[in-house]
Image (cartoon, grey):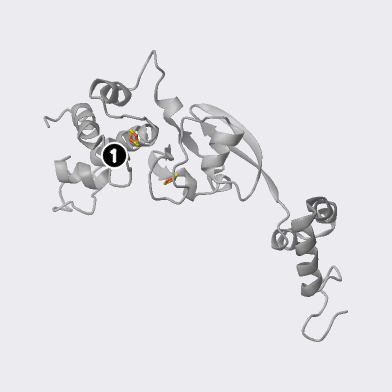
Amino acid sequence: MHGPNDPPNDHGISRRDLLIVGAASFAIPHIAEAAAPSLARAEAAAIGVPIMSNVSFEVNGKTRDVAIDTRTTLLDALREHLHLIGTKKGCDHGQCGACTVIVGGRRINSCLTLAVMHQGETITTIEGLGTPEQMHPMQAAFVKHDGYQCGYCTPGQICSAVAVLDEVKAGIPSHVSTDLNAPPELTNAELRERMSGNICRCGAYSNIAEAITEVAGRKA
Ligand code: FES
Ligand code: FES
């Protein structure tokens, strides 16, 4: 029944019908899947039916194409679809930095962004920086300075550190930069501020700072 406050839409489905279908789809997903072709995309989204999309981006120098649920985070796309498990899921809420990757030269928390937002972009994960045989200078410095204990935060720390040095080189100020008209220097305060989004439960901070400082060519 469609009342005056619940008129049918173009498909002859009222809001109440949608809610009923939504509840049914929660219990019996196959029913919702069967109904999906006849529903508009917005309606399908409203009742929780996955909307798939093809996304293509360049990951670690290779073009990768994936067909994914549009709600998939970049982190899950990398780990679950491309099997690049070097990028870690810590909090999944943008608070720990374990999922840091470099997108278009800028570091981001991959748990806070949808994969479909990065169509055509260039993504670098820890696997793209170096290999055990041929490490990126930042990876080698972390090994040399013991910049980790359990290692869970380390891929994110290293991706972040690489991007931090590029930020400083590009003259991008941080919240603690005192002179916005001069290129920032990587002082201890700048380093701590810029790496503050990467949490290490093991407390390897002093060794991490030494590693980054060495790669920056600065004495600690
Ligand atoms: Fe992304 Fe913690 S997993 S910030
Ligand atoms: Fe264990 Fe950082 S090395 S969390």
User: Is the residue marked by circle 1 packed among few (<14), some (14-19), or many (20+) residues within 10 Å?
Assistant: many
Q: What element carries label 1?
A: helix
Identified at 84% across, 56% down, the residue is 35
Can residue 205 be seen by looking at this rendering? Answer: yes
Residue 78: % across, % down: 54, 35
**Extreme residue in the top direction:** 133
**Extreme residue in the bottom direction:** 4
Can residue 57 be seen by looking at this rendering? Answer: no
Image quadrant containing the N terminus = bottom right
Residue 213: % across, % down: 19, 31
Pick whichever, 40 or 25, lies toward us.
25
Residue 89: % across, % down: 47, 40
Count every numbered label the image shows and give the total.
1
Q: Which amino acid does label 1 sit on?
A: Val
Disc 1 target residue: 164
Q: Quadrant of residue 14?
A: bottom right
Give the vertical position of 54 relative to 60 (above or below).
below
Pick whichever, 59 or 170, lies toward us.
59
Identified at 47% across, 35% down, the residue is 123
**Extreme residue in the left direction:** 219
Residue 196: % across, % down: 28, 46
Relative side of 97 to 55, left or right: left
Pick whichever, 104 or 135, lies toward us.
135
Image quadrant containing the C terminus = top left
Relative side of 199 to 169, left or right: right
Q: In which quarter of the image is residue 161?
A: top left
Pick whichever, 130 or 24, lies toward us.
24
Give the vertical position of 132 relative to 119 (above or below).
above
- Which quadrant contains ligand 2? top left
